[in-house]
Image (cartoon, rainbow, N blue to C red):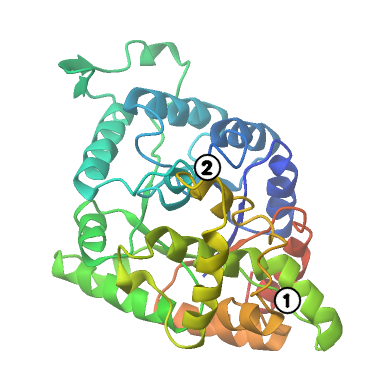
Amino acid sequence: MEYGVAFASEVDSWKWAKRAEELGYSSAWFYDTQLLNPDVFICMTLAAANTESIRLGTGVLVPTNRIEPVTANAFASLNKLAPGRIDFGIGTGFTARRTMGLNAVPLAQTRTYIERVQSMLRGETVEWDFEGKDRKIRFLNPDLGLINIDDEIPLWVSAFGPKARQMTAELDAGWLNFGAGDAVFQGIEEMQTGWQQAGREKEDLKSVLFTVGSVLTGDKGRDDVKVMAEAGPYTAVIFHGAADTAGMFESHRPEGPLAELLESYLATHQSYEPDDARYLQNHRGHLMFVRPEESHLSPDLVRATSMSGTRNELVDEVGRLKDAGYSQLTVQLIHGHEEAIEEWAEVFHLCGL
């Protein structure tokens, strides 16, 4: 198994990517959320210029936020800086689009976007509709060596539902999953089934699990503070997403004890202004910090919804994930707490990093 790190993109993220490279991590992934973080490609460019071997990927890029030739050009330019080290991770836009009050991009539109970008990166002429007119486009001067479309840029798709997993298999893409606990084991089983149903060999599936957690010390008082800082923002996201879809998709609502907490958060959500754009406050601090009004979050809840534990507990969990078939485990580092990369490296070295 390989190990990676993921960041809320910042202009200084390159420093942590460089440190990850020094510690032996294989990949660094960067969030693409325009209203929360600096531009992902600028941050990746800085990382590409300051590292030598670590892979750099979008985790994940969002269709519709850039037209296809702009995205293809950005990847080809990065590939010039870091030949053969760039990964094209893409999803339907949970965070980046929700922060603008938009729903996820339909799968068919996502697939068309992916295929156009990939075709351009192969140097092909692409049929492209824009501003109500069909056009043909391609890179015009790849032979000048200003960009790099010779080295492969692997495709990775964030896919949760059965149709998205089917698309991932049909595209022969790597699979990106997000989460912790029992759901991530069920998720990879379902992805493996979909992969094989598409006529592919189970062992050929490449899969990355993005997770958030904290390496705990065994001192409860200290660990309560630590887990809230290093993993609390992830637990908050569960409520952000549920608030977005409340009344729309009952299947997205938490069950059991979380249901009561959700009702409490929904009441708070109703106080956000302006009332026709509550999403602006709902996603503030998303995967970066816990807001003062998110008092429904507790250390115990965060432990239960994240990959948090002592070193020995985490080593055991990493082993289970490896046995389940994940080929890479990526830890999502929280803004302001990136130094946790050191503790996670110690865990991963015990696992064979």
Count of picture labels: 2
Above or below for 274 versus 22:
above
- Seen at 67% across and 85% down, the residue is 300
Per the model, the C-alpha gap separating discs 1 and 2 is 27 Å
Which quarter of the picture shows residue 175? bottom left
Disc 2 residue type (three-letter):
Thr
In contact (CB < 8 Å): disc 1 and disc 2: no
Disc 1 residue type (three-letter):
Val
Drawn side of residue 126 relative to residue 300, left or right: left
Above or below for 341 versus 51:
below
Q: Name the residue tied to disc 1.
A: 215
Drawn side of residue 28 relative to residue 327, left or right: right
Tell me residue 272's x, y (percent): 57, 53
The numbered mark, 1 or 2, whose residue comes first in the sequence reads: 2
Which quarter of the picture shows residue 304? bottom right
Q: Name the residue tied to disc 2.
A: 33
- Seen at 51% across and 82% down, the residue is 260
Tell me residue 299's x, y (percent): 70, 80
Drawn side of residue 114 relative to residue 94, left or right: left
Q: Secondary structure at mark 1?
A: loop
